[in-house]
C-alpha cells in the first residue's frame, strides 16, 4: 500500500552517498519514484550524472557530507557504502533531523568488527562458523591446529573486501594471521563452512523488516570460481539455492532474532541488514553481516522491486516500514561486471568506454556505472570495477543472455568479465 501523502517526503530531495554500481542503481530506482523530485549524489560517477547532480564530496568526508545535506535541505540521505556508516554519518544526520537510510555507528559495528558480529550471533544462538580471536602471535600456531584445513583467517575491521583469507596452505594461513595481529592487534580464525553462498538483503527499522529478492554474488575473479576474491564480478536474482525451506530457517533463526535484538537498542536500526549465507543441505549459516545494500546484489535486486523505491526507503528511514507492502516482480535479473585490466591488484584507469549509451529496445538490460568519469564528451574508466550490465527476463537463462548481449556492445581496452554468471543455478536444473 502506498504511504499516505501526509507521511511522504516534503520536497522529495534525496542525497545518495557513494559512487558505485549500487548507487547508480539506487539513483535509477529513485528517478522512477513519484515522491522524489531531485536527486543528488556524492560523489557519484558518469552514470549518476545522467540521473541527478553529482557533488564533488568524498563518501568518507563526514563533515562535508553533513554540510551538503544541510545546504541542499535534503529530505532523505541514502548511504551506500559501509565506511561512512561505521564512521557515524547516520548518527550525525539524525542529530541534524535529517532522515537517513543506514544504521547508526553502533549498528554498523556488525560489519565494522567481525568479533562484535560473532559475539552478537553467539549470544542470540544464530548459526555461524565457530571461531576464536587471537591477540598474540605466539597463540596462532596452536589456534590454527584446532581447526581443520582449509583455514579461514579474518581481519577484525573494514578491509574493503580484502580482509579474509581462505586457504589450504598452512604457511599462508600462518602468514595472514601474523600480519593481521601485527596490523590490528588481533585476528579471527574460524571454521571453514562448505556449501553454496547466497545474499539476503533485509530492509529493517524498529517497526519491522522486509526481505528483498534473494541473490547470489560471484566473488572470485575468474570463471568456475577461480582466482582471487574481488568486490563481486556478477550476481543473479532470485537465487534458487534459497528454497522456501531455507528461507523459513533464515527468517526464524537469523532475521527474526536479529530484528528482535536491533529493534530493542536505544538507537533504532534503519537501513539494510545484508545477511551473507553459506547453505549446505538446506541449512543456512551466517558468513557475514553487512550493514548496507550489497554491490553487485543491488543491481539485480532493485530492478525487481515494483513498489515505489522512494517511498520504500523513506518508510525505512522514518521507522514506518511495517506500513509498506513490498511488491516484487516475478522476473529474473542477472548482472555481469566489467573490470579494468589489472583488477583487482592494479587496475588500469583513464581508458575510454564506448557503446554504453546506445539504446537497444530488443534487449531488456540496464547499464550501471561504477568506476566511470566524464571528461568532456567521453566517458573514461576510473576504477577497478567499471560498470555492470543487468539483464532482465522471465527466466534466468534469458536474463543472462540479455546481460551478455548488451555487454558485447561495450568496449574498454583490456576490460574483462566473467562468462559464467549464473552457472550454479543453471547447472542445478
Ligand atoms: P566475508 O568478508 O566474511 O564475507 O568473507 C569473504 C568470502 O570468504 C565469503 O564470501 C566466502 O566466500 C569466504 N568465506 C568467509 N568465511 C568463510 C567460512 N567460514 N567458510 C568458507 N568460506 C568463507
Ligand atoms: N557483494 C558483496 C558485498 O557487497 O559485500
Image: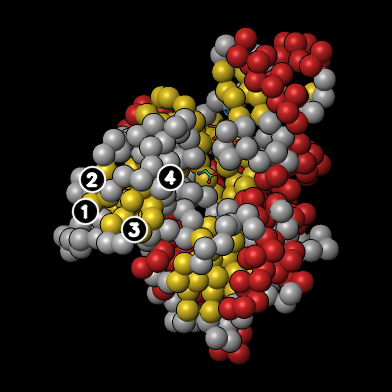
Query: In front: mark 3 or mark 2?
Result: 3
As measured in the structure, the alpha-carbon distance from the residue carrying label 1 to the one carrying label 2 is 6 Å
User: Which numbered circle lies on residue 383?
Assistant: 4
Q: Residues within 10 Å of mark 1 (few under 14, many from 20)?
A: few
- Of helix, strand and loop, which one carries label 1? loop
Viewer-proximal residue, 299 or 355? Answer: 355
Is residue 172 in view?
Answer: yes
Residue tagged 1: 355
Viewer-proximal residue, 375 or 41? Answer: 375
As measured in the structure, the alpha-carbon distance from the residue carrying label 3 to the one carrying label 2 is 17 Å
Q: Earlier in the sequence, mark 1 or mark 3?
A: 1
Viewer-proximal residue, 378 or 164? Answer: 378
Q: Earlier in the sequence, mark 1 or mark 2?
A: 1
As measured in the structure, the alpha-carbon distance from the residue carrying label 1 to the one carrying label 3 is 16 Å
Residue tagged 2: 411
Q: Residues within 10 Å of mark 2 (few under 14, many from 20)?
A: some
Residue tagged 3: 375
Q: Is mark 2 within 8 Å of ligand 2?
A: no
Q: Earlier in the sequence, mark 3 or mark 2?
A: 3
Q: In the rendering, at what x and y percent does residue 29 appear?
A: 43, 68
Asked whether disc 1 touches disc 2, contact meaning CB atoms under 8 Å apart, the reply is: yes
Q: Quadrant of ligand 1?
A: top right
Q: Could you tell me which residue is drawn at 38 percent across and 55 percent down?
A: 373
Image height of 368 relative to 420, above or below: below
Amino acid at each position: 500500500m502506498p504511504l499516505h501523502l501526509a507521511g511522504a517526503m516534503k520536497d522529495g530531495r534525496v542525497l545518495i552517498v557513494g559512487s558505485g554500481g549500487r548507487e547508480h542503481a539506487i539513483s535509477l530506482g529513485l528517478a522512477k519514484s513519484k515522491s522524489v523530485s531531485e536527486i543528488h549524489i556524492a560523489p557519484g560517477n558518469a552514470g549518476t550524472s545522467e540521473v541527478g547532480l553529482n557533488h564533488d564530496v568524498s563518501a568518507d568526508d563526514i563533515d562535508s557530507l553533513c554540510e551538503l545535506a544541510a545546504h541542499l535541505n535534503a529530505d532523505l540521505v541514502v548511504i551506500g557504502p559501509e565506511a561512512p556508516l561505521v564512521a557515524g554519518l547516520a548518527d550525525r544526520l539524525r542529530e541534524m533531523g535529517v532522515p537517513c537510510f543506514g544504521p547508526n555507528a553502533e549498528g554498523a559495528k556488525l560489519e565494522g568488527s567481525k568479533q562484535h558480529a560473532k559475539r552478537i550471533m553467539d549470544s542470540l544462538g544464530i548459526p555461524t562458523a565457530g571461531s576464536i580471536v587471537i591477540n598474540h602471535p605466539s597463540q596462532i600456531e596452536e589456534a590454527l591446529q584446532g581447526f581443520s584445513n582449509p583455514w579461514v583467517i579474518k581481519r577484525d575491521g573494514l578491509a574493503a573486501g580484502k580482509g579474509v583469507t581462505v586457504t589450504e596452505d598452512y604457511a599462508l594461513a600462518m602468514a595472514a594471521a601474523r600480519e593481521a595481529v601485527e596490523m590490528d592487534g588481533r585476528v579471527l580464525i574460524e571454521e571453514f563452512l562448505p556449501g553454496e553462498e547466497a545474499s539476503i538483503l533485509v530492509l529493517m527499522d524498529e517497526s519491522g523488516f522486509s526481505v528483498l529478492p534473494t541473490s547470489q554474488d560471484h566473488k572470485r575473479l575468474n570463471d568456475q570460481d577461480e582466482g582471487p576474491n574481488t568486490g563481486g564480478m556478477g550476481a543473479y536474482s532470485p537465487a534458487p539455492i534459497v528454497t522456501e525451506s531455507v528461507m523459513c530457517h533464515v527468517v526464524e533463526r537469523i532475521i527474526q532474532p536479529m530484528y528482535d535484538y536491533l529493534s530493542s537498542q536505544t538507537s533504532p536500526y534503519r537501513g539494510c541488514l545484508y545477511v551473507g549465507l553459506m547453505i549446505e543441505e538446506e541449512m543456512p549459516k551466517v558468513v557475514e553481516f553487512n550493514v548496507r545494500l550489497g554491490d553487485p546484489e543491488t543491481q539485480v535486486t532493485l530492478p525487481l522491486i515494483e513498489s515505489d523505491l522512494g517511498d520504500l526507503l523513506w518508510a525505512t528511514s522514518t521507522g514506518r516500514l511495517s506500513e509498506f507492502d513490498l511488491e516484487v516482480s516475478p522476473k529474473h535479473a542477472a548482472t555481469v561486471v566489467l573490470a579494468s585490466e589489472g583488477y583487482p591488484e592494479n587496475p588500469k584507469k583513464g581508458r575510454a568506454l564506448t557503446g554504453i549509451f546506445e539504446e537497444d529496445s530488443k534487449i531488456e538490460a540496464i547499464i550501471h556505472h561504477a568506476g566511470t568519469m566524464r571528461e568532456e564528451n567521453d566517458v573514461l574508466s576510473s576504477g577497478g570495477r567499471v560498470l555492470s550490465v543487468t539483464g532482465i527476463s522471465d527466466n534466468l537463462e534469458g536474463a543472462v543472455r540479455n546481460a551478455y548481449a548488451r555487454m558485447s556492445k561495450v568496449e574498454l581496452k583490456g576490460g574483462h568479465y566473467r562468462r559464467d554468471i549464473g552457472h550454479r543455478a543453471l547447472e542445478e536444473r
